[in-house]
Image: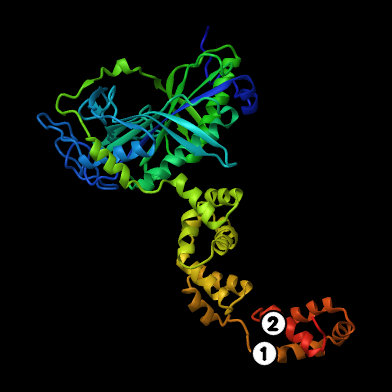
């Protein structure tokens, strides 16, 4: 059967592709561990340093330089494995993964092959509608990162067409943990959503464990997305492609959707999918061919002779297990119960990235309902208008808590609180400072309110007559006039009471 070029076929509509084929995905996630030094040498781990300044003889692969395992990196790897419900190996070892490329100065990568430190785990991920999907974990193993190539002079930033290349070895040797899933089946049309939710759940776990900053924009977390199609869920697995180094949640989802449509077009045209790595292009939303995918044999793995096996004691493993913090899934379930949120409300909070903000606002004294009201209401609208994330707004949970305290004390009402919040967002100070500077406190002096009421009643005698005649609902017009006269700073409920009292009408 001939191979059909990807440029010779149009993409199949995603829904049509799902009707005809069953997608199977597999995800390999690399996380850079936040240790002070590299995986096998004392060179510092830095970000943004001058090229080739955070290096040592080991990370440069100089003759005679011998590696030493970073103990903290091993502990972090165990923490990750435990959080993913993995078994922790009683004994594991490093291997040499041989390949020749300028950013690998030793001409091999020190990794783990047949003896990973963690294996046979799973992670339950929650989709946006509350569906829980279990992703089976095959292994989590330790390895080192490669350096970074910069190809100069071409139009694509890749080696083809470049005039020359530069190599920075600062990243070479940084500790990584690679987490490999088993084939993820049964997701069907939701495969892109499952892939995104899985990577996002991993990122949250890394941050909670304190093993990495997990900033995808810096490459702290990178995902390789494998995808294949088969005619039915009962059919053998199809030929897979591996889209390399996808570094945002949205891109993970888009890459899966694109590969489903692309591969479906090839298969529908009678062609065969090439087993290869592919590059993801964020700007165009497409993948392009990289290289034919190597099998494990091509790397000629063999045990690393310069490193002894790693044998974590069971006592150490259990001590690490006991020290694990509350994981994101358990935390969300606990807070949902504590706060009394409905499941859809909590999903909205999670999708907006507001969970930490609301929790901190509650800790600052606001009720869960009030905290959610501010962050998911006024502040969410402001963030959308400014095209920023909620956490990027110039207001803190402590300030939102202080704002709500002013409302709870009766010093301002909700309308005035929104004006105070505007001032805080404008950089005018704390809620208290804005309230004082703008003179936004509620008018609570009955004398001042009665003066305003009399003025409005005098201006609307016909409305006053209707109220005296029993049409109590007409009092709203007088209340509105008083609120306008006091710039919204009156307590509307108290104003209504005073109006009815003034006119001798029972409320």
Question: Quadrant of residue 485 in the image?
Answer: bottom right
Q: Residue at x 71, y 83 (%)?
A: 495
Q: Residue furthest left?
A: 64
Query: What's the distance in space between the residues labelled 1 and 2, CA to CA?
Result: 9 Å
| Residue underneath mark 1 | 446
The x and y percentages for residue 61 are: 17, 31
Along the viewing direction, whichever of 458 and 49 lies nearer the viewer: 458
Disc ID at residue 494 = 2
- Up the image or down, 504 lies above or below 171; here it is below
Whether residues under marks 1 and 2 lie with C-beta atoms below 8 angstroms apart, the answer is: yes
Q: Is residue 106 left or right of residue 164?
A: left
The x and y percentages for residue 474 are: 83, 78
Disc ID at residue 35 = none
Along the viewing direction, whichever of 3 and 254 lies nearer the viewer: 254
Mark count: 2
Name the quarter where the C terminus is drawn: bottom right
The x and y percentages for residue 119 are: 34, 28
The x and y percentages for residue 441 are: 58, 81
């Amino acid at each position: 059967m001939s191979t059909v070029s990807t440029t010779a076929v149009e993409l199949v509509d995603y829904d049509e592709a799902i009707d005809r084929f069953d997608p199977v995905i597999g995800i390999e996630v690399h996380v850079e561990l936040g240790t002070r030094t590299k995986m096998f040498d004392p060179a510092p781990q830095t970000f943004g340093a001058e090229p080739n300044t955070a290096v040592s003889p080991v990370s440069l692969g100089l003759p005679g330089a011998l590696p030493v395992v970073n103990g903290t990196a091993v502990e972090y790897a165990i923490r990750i494995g435990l959080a993913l419900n993995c078994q922790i190996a009683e004994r594991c070892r490093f291997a040499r993964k041989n390949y020749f490329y300028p950013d690998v100065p030793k001409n091999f990568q020190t990794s783990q092959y047949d003896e990973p430190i963690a294996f046979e785990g799973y992670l339950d991920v929650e989709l946006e509608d509350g569906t829980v999907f279990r992703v089976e974990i095959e292994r989590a193993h330790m390895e080192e990162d490669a350096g970074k190539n910069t190809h100069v002079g071409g139009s694509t930033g890749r080696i083809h067409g470049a005039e020359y290349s530069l190599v920075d070895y600062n990243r070479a040797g940084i500790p990584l943990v690679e987490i490999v899933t088993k084939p993820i089946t049964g997701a069907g049309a939701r495969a892109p959503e499952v892939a995104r939710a899985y990577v996002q759940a991993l990122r949250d776990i890394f941050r909670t464990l304190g093993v990495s900053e997990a900033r995808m924009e810096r490459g702290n977390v990178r995902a390789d997305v494998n995808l294949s199609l088969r005619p039915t869920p009962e059919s053998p697995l199809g030929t897979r492609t591996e889209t390399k180094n996808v570094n945002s949640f949205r891109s993970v989802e888009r890459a899966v959707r694109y590969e489903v449509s692309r591969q479906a077009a090839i298969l529908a045209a009678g062609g065969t999918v090439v087993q290869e790595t592919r590059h993801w292009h964020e700007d165009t939303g497409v993948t392009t061919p990289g290289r034919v995918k190597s099998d494990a044999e091509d790397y000629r793995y063999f045990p690393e002779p310069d490193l002894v096996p790693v044998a974590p004691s069971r006592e150490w493993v259990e001590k690490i297990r006991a020290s694990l913090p509350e994981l994101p899934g358990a935390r969300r379930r606990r807070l949902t119960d504590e706060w009394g949120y409905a499941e859809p409300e909590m999903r909205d909070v999670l999708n907006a990235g507001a969970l930490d903000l609301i929790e901190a606002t509650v800790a600052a004294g606001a009720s869960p309902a009030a905290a959610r009201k501010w962050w998911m209401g006024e502040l969410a609208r402001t963030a959308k208008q400014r095209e920023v994330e909620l956490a990027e707004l110039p207001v803190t949970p402590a300030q939102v808590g202080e704002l709500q305290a002013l409302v709870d004390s009766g010093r301002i009402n909700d309308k005035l609180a929104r004006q105070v919040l505007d001032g805080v967002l404008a950089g005018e100070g704390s809620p208290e400072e804005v309230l004082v500077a703008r003179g936004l406190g509620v008018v609570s002096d009955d004398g001042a309110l009665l003066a305003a009421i009399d003025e409005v009643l005098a201006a609307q005698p016909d409305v006053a007559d209707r109220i005296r005649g029993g049409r109590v609902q007409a009092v709203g017009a007088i209340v509105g006039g008083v609120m306008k006269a006091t710039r919204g700073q009156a307590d509307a409920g108290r104003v209504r009471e005073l109006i009815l009292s003034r006119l001798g009408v029972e409320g």
